[in-house]
Amino acid sequence: MPSKKVKKKRNLSTYLAVLPAALLVVFIVYLVATPPSQSISTIATTGQTNTVKTGDIAAPFSLDLIDETGLKNEKVTFRPDSGQIYFIDFIHEWCVHCRNMAPIVERLHQTYAEKGVVFITVAGGYNTDAQKTAQFIKNYRVTWPVGFDPQLEIFRQYGVRGTPTYVIVNRNGIITAKLEGEQPYEALARELDRLLG
Amino acid sequence: MIPYLIFAVSISGLFLSIYLTLLPPPPFCEISSFLSCDTVLSSAYAKFLGVPTAFYGVVWFAIAASLSMLASNGKRFAKLALGWAVIGVAAVGVLTYVELVLIGAVCILCTAAHVLAIAVAALSFYQFKS
């Protein structure tokens, strides 16, 4: 016959054995109800101070131009009052989701640049440098202007919380879409078609 | 005492794995291009069979915690716990290979989870022997 103390210990062990299993079940239910979005590489240092949203007026900016050979002695200038439609994508060369999206953005560029949409890429300098960014431009055949944002000033200005983030600006300089994370081609094309239509 | 220690370590690993499954890596995790949680957690290997890799950690630690308690009541469960520990150590080996060789970066929070898994395995082995 087990003593009272042993019985009590066994009871405690049994309760404790059930606890992690219960935690696991609760966690699975939570995951099914709210699946985590992992298609964005977050940057903890941006996005907290300035939350730019759809309907806001886009802020102009000017950045050093970078191409596949490195930083150039030229500027990439975004002027929202120029009467053009802009597609701005915020990336980091190390961001896997940005690499996944590169062919989609290239396809968008092929289709919409000739319809008058101006493409600008803002490449961040968080945990990277101009040389690596130039390599990204070369590897993914980015043929439109890329501005290098080493201190993430424009990222902050646009409240970019992670990469990739896509900002679409209409002819009046108003932000009509701000999409975070990997996007299907159709979702981005739909936003541009809406402005061109 | 040992079962409770295994339980505590497993629960720590469980919460760490839940964190890695749900939330983006914290800023202190981005030390360099090599020591970068984001590089690892946004890589193609961050998911296995469509499920976040960290979720497998949640399952492993939850079962390890339960087994640690059940093992204190019988040798059969102690054997199971030991077998489970071996699976855990093998998984840590594979994940470390993936980080170092295939991704070329190390996530320190993932490494912390690996250390906890190895600690659970070592303690389970000790429990089984004693």
Image: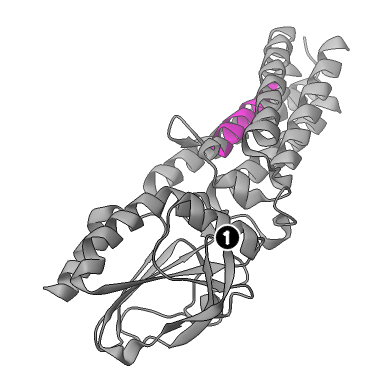
Horizontally, residue A128 falls left or right of residue A75, namely: right
* Residue placed most toward the observer, A41 or A169: A169
Amino acid on which disc 1 is placed: Thr
The quarter of the picture where the C terminus of chain A appears is bottom left
Residue that mark 1 sits on: A133
Assign a secondary structure to mark 1: helix
- In the shown orientation, is residue A112 left or right of residue A14? left
Q: Is residue B38 above or below residue A74?
A: above
Q: Residue A105 is drawn in which quadrant?
A: bottom left
Let me know if residue A118 is in the magenta part.
no
Question: Dot 1 falls on which chain?
Answer: A
Give the image location of residue A54, x and y in percent: 32, 78
Q: Is residue B118 left or right of residue A112?
A: right
The location of residue B50, given as percent across then percent down, is: 43, 34
Residue found farthest to the bottom: A81
The residue that appears at 56% across and 61% down in the rendered structure is A69
In the rendered image, residue B101, in percent from the top left (x then y), is placed at: 68, 32
Q: Residue at x 73, y 14 (%)?
A: B82
Toward the viewer: A128 or B50?
A: A128
The image shows residue A23, relative to residue B96, as above or below, that is: below
Residue B128 in sight:
yes
Q: Position of residue B84 (x, y in %)?
A: 67, 18
Magenta segment range?
A: B54-67
At label 1, counting other C-alpha atoms closer than 10 Å, the crowd grade (few under 14, some 14-19, many 20 or more) is: many
Q: Main secondary structure of the magenta part?
A: helix
| Residue B62 on the magenta segment | yes
